[in-house]
């Protein structure tokens, strides 16, 4: 009887200890992980490590560039820093529409159709709408246009194109037909896309709107004339290292 | 014997808190399965005791065997990618309830017997 009690006590003791240890280790959380979860985590860790390696390489490259710049301080003739900054500046001013640009591209003219209406046909079929211009601009951007203007108004980041009665407002200015859209880019590609079977130019022509597109070797597009005031958007400062 | 089990559990809980044992979390599931097996053995022993069929060697070997088998099943299941530990959970869990039901009946019978005697 006594022996029995001792063995039962021993086993109960072991169970009690195991219980507490286990409860402490898990903290009530599910800690069993399947093989799949482990593999997933391993894949994630590997990809994170690859990213880290990538970033290390980027840092190395940046350091090389920095060393180049450091050397440059003593080299009067060729200033890499300045030329790099100039390149960047040109790029961003083209991007923002802040400077006049020229280059090969296309000139598109869109005008209201002049044919007679069919019996009961909606006149809207023949008119140019804001949405038509928007669709053409979108198509041009899709075809790699680098600068676009409509009736001389540069299309920039904040450009809006609205319908206002018989006219269209672009960048807050009112324009009437015809609309001349200029775009700098790969002309053949833009024409091919606009006049393809499903292109928007083809659709306009089918409705009866006048749509002509010409490839030009030299297109000039003026800078954006409006001014930008950022009231709400503020630059997010870089964290100091 | 029931009292011994009770005190053993309490002593074990206190010891667990006092000793502050830790082990790698990877093994925690095996420990859980072994714990379930051990608990089953203990309840089984209590039942055998009440039925007067208790055998110390069977108890101790059953305790060790069940715990090891449960751990091994879990390990094998992990390696094969099949949740084999379910087998241990179902068997031990089911037996736990079975044994507990038997123990309860035996206890009630004893109490009723005592009352009849009086």
Image (spheres, coloured by chain):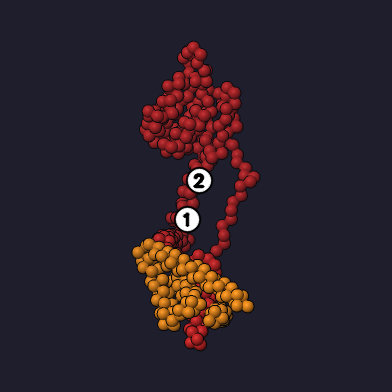
Residue pushed farthest bottom? A2
Q: In terms of depth relative to the viewer, which is nearer, B40 or A99?
A: B40
Q: Is residue A170 above or below residue A209?
A: below
Residue B27 can be seen in this image: no
Quadrant of residue A153 in the image? Answer: top right
Q: Of B107 and A226, which appears nearest the observer?
A: B107
- Label 2 Cα neighbours within 10 Å, binned few <14 / some 14-19 / many ≥20: few
- Left-right relation of A143 to A24: left
C-alpha gap between disc 2 and disc 1: 17 Å
Who's the residue at 60% across and 78% down the image?
B117
Q: Secondary structure at mark 2?
A: helix
Same chain for mark 2 and mark 1? The answer is yes
The residue indicated by pointer 1 is: A81
Q: Position of residue B4 (x, y in %)?
A: 54, 82
Q: Which residue shows up at 55% across the image and 23% down it?
A: A176
Q: Which chain's colour is red?
A: A
Select label 2 or label 1 by which is in front. Answer: 2
* Number of other residues with Cα within 10 Å of mark 1, as a class: few under 14, some 14 to 19, many 20 or more: some
Residue B102 image offset from top left, x and y in percent: 50, 70
Residue B8's place in the image compared with B76, above or below, is below
- Residue A1 seen from this side: yes
Asked which quadrant contains residue A105, the reply is top left
Chain in orange colour:
B
The image quarter containing residue B34 is bottom left
Q: How many marks do you count on the picture?
A: 2
Q: Chain of mark 2?
A: A
Q: Which tag, 2 or 1, sits closer to the chain's start?
A: 1
Q: Residue furthest front?
A: B117
Q: Residue at x 50, y 86 (%)?
A: A1
Tell me the residue that label 2 is attached to. A92
Q: Residue B26: give x, y in percent of width and height.
A: 44, 70
User: Which structural element holds mark 1?
Assistant: helix
């Amino acid at each position: 009887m006594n022996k029995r009690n001792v063995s039962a006590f021993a086993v109960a003791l072991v169970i009690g200890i195991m219980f507490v240890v286990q409860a402490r280790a898990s903290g009530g959380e599910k800690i069993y992980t399947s093989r799949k979860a482990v593999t997933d985590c391993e894949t994630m860790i590997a990809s994170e490590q690859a990213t880290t390696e990538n970033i290390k390489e980027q840092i190395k490259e940046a350091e090389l560039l920095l060393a180049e710049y450091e050397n440059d301080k003593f080299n009067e003739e060729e200033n890499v820093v300045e030329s790099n900054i100039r390149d960047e500046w040109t790029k961003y001013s083209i991007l923002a529409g802040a400077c006049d640009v020229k280059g090969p591209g296309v000139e598109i003219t869109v005008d209201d159709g002049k044919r007679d209406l069919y019996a009961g046909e909606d006149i809207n079929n023949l008119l140019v709408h804001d949405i038509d211009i928007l669709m053409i601009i979108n198509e041009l951007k899709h075809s790699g246009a680098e600068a676009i203007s409509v009736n001389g108004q540069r299309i920039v980041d904040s450009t809006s194109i609205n319908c206002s009665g018989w006219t269209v407002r672009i960048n807050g200015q009112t324009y009437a037909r015809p609309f001349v859209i200029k775009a700098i880019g790969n002309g053949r590609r833009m024409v091919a896309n606009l006049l393809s079977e499903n292109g928007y130019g083809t659709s306009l022509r089918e409705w009866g709107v006048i749509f002509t597109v010409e490839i030009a070797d030299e297109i000039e597009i003026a800078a954006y004339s409006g001014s930008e005031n950022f009231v709400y958007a503020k630059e997010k400062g870089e964290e100091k290292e | 014997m029931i009292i011994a089990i009770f005190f053993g559990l309490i002593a074990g809980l206190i010891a667990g808190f006092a000793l502050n044992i830790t082990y790698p979390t990877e093994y925690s599931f095996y420990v859980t399965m072994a714990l379930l097996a051990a608990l089953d053995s203990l309840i089984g022993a209590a039942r055998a005791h009440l039925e007067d069929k208790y055998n110390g060697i069977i108890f101790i070997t059953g305790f060790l065997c069940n715990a090891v088998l449960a751990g091994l099943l879990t390990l094998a299941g992990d390696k094969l990618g099949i949740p084999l530990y379910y087998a241990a959970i179902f068997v031990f869990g089911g037996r736990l309830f079975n044994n507990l039901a038997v123990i309860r009946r035996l206890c009630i019978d004893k109490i009723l017997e005592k009352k009849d005697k009086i």
